């Protein structure tokens, strides 16, 4: 019997409180997702690994009806507060679940997993399970869209590995500061990137509290991802290399794959 590796929920909970400090203003991918969601009908949209609701809230405001699942209670708590504050409770349903094993008992016009979230599953088998489970939740004629970085373009070189870089500096309205340092290492045999995050929370008096939040990402080559989608029973409809939906080519920054249920 194959044993399923449990997701390290605490890894996601550790940086839930900092995620929006760094990512709330990130909207590079939003027009693309708005375009996909615009074609969703009454069966709505399912977002996997929805996190703090970075995409859920603006898509709901644009008129979509969405269900978001995430394995992290802390991430969902932040998302729930944001959805309520945006008065979108009637359009957004949040579910705590593992994206490999959930069963919502219904299908959707669009299932989406954005911004490298599939890569938080650290084995090929786990990624296969997530894609197969997602495919079962796509209605006939519906689409499943995955967005991950292209390892041909996005991996650090050997000189960068192990170095600590300032990744983000944010000054909050109360004059406290968040400094986010990050260090990367790559196991090319296992296709794993280990990301070590150091969050330095500096209060108005200069007191520093450091929080450590490591996680790992399993990257995929484009051919491997295409194969997993096809094996799930979906037909690959499009393959893009950027958020402008340019055709994928060697060196493209993103792998954005669109599978359709026949």
Image (spheres, grey):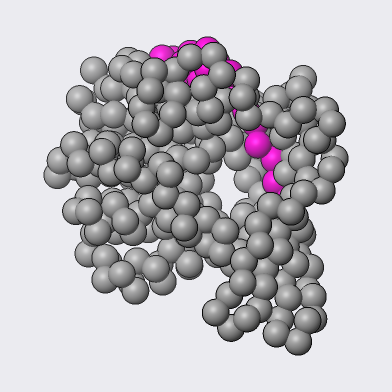
Q: Position of residue 173 (x, y in %)?
A: 55, 79
- Residue at 66% x, 78% y: name it: 176
Q: Position of residue 183 (x, y in %)?
A: 78, 45
Considering only vertical position in the picture, is 122 above or below 220?
A: below
Tell me, yes or no, if residue 73 can be seen here.
no
Determine the image quadrant of residue 5. top right
- Residue at 85% x, 40% y: name it: 162
In this view, the residue in front, 186 or 140, is 186
- Residue at 34% x, 22% y: name it: 259
Q: Position of residue 205 (x, y in %)?
A: 76, 87
Q: Is residue 248 left or right of residue 237?
A: right
Q: Quadrant of the C terminus?
A: top left
Considering only vertical position in the picture, is 152 above or below 113?
A: above
Total labels: the figure holds 0
- Residue at 50% x, 28% y: name it: 254
In this view, the residue in front, 102 or 176, is 176
Q: Position of residue 179 (x, y in %)?
A: 71, 64
Considering only vertical position in the picture, is 200 above or below 104?
A: below
In this view, the residue in front, 93 or 183, is 183
Tell me, yes or no, if residue 59 can be seen here.
yes
Q: Quadrant of the N terminus?
A: top right
- Whether residue 41 appears in magenta in the rendering, the answer is no
- Whether residue 231 appears in magenta in the rendering, the answer is yes
Determine the image quadrant of residue 231. top left
Considering only vertical position in the picture, is 36 above or below 177?
A: above
Q: Magenta segment range?
A: 214-233
């Amino acid at each position: 019997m194959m044993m399923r590796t449990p997701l390290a929920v605490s890894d996601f909970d550790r940086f839930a409180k900092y995620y929006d400090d760094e990512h709330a203003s990130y909207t590079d991918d939003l027009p693309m997702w708005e375009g996909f969601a615009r074609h969703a009908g009454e069966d709505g949209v399912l977002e996997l690994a929805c996190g703090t609701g970075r995409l859920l809230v603006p898509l709901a405001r644009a008129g979509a009806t969405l269900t978001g699942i995430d394995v992290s209670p802390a991430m969902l708590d932040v998302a729930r507060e944001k959805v309520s504050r945006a008065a979108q409770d009637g359009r957004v349903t949040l579910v705590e679940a593992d994206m490999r094993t959930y069963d919502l008992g219904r299908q959707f016009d669009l299932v989406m997993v954005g911004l490298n979230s599939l890569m938080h599953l650290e084995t090929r088998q786990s990624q296969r399970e997530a894609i197969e489970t997602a495919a079962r939740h796509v209605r006939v004629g519906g689409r499943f869209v995955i967005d991950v970085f292209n390892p041909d373009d996005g991996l650090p070189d050997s000189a960068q590995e192990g170095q600590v870089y300032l990744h983000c500096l944010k000054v909050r309205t109360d004059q406290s500061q968040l400094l986010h340092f990050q260090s990367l290492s790559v196991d090319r045999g296992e296709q794993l990137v280990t990301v070590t995050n150091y969050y330095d929370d500096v209060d108005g008096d200069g007191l520093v509290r450091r929080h450590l939040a490591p996680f790992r990402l399993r990257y995929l080559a484009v051919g491997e991802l295409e194969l997993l989608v096809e094996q799930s029973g979906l037909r690959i409809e499009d393959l893009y290399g950027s958020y402008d939906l340019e055709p994928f080519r060697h060196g493209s920054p993103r792998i954005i794959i669109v599978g359709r249920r026949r």
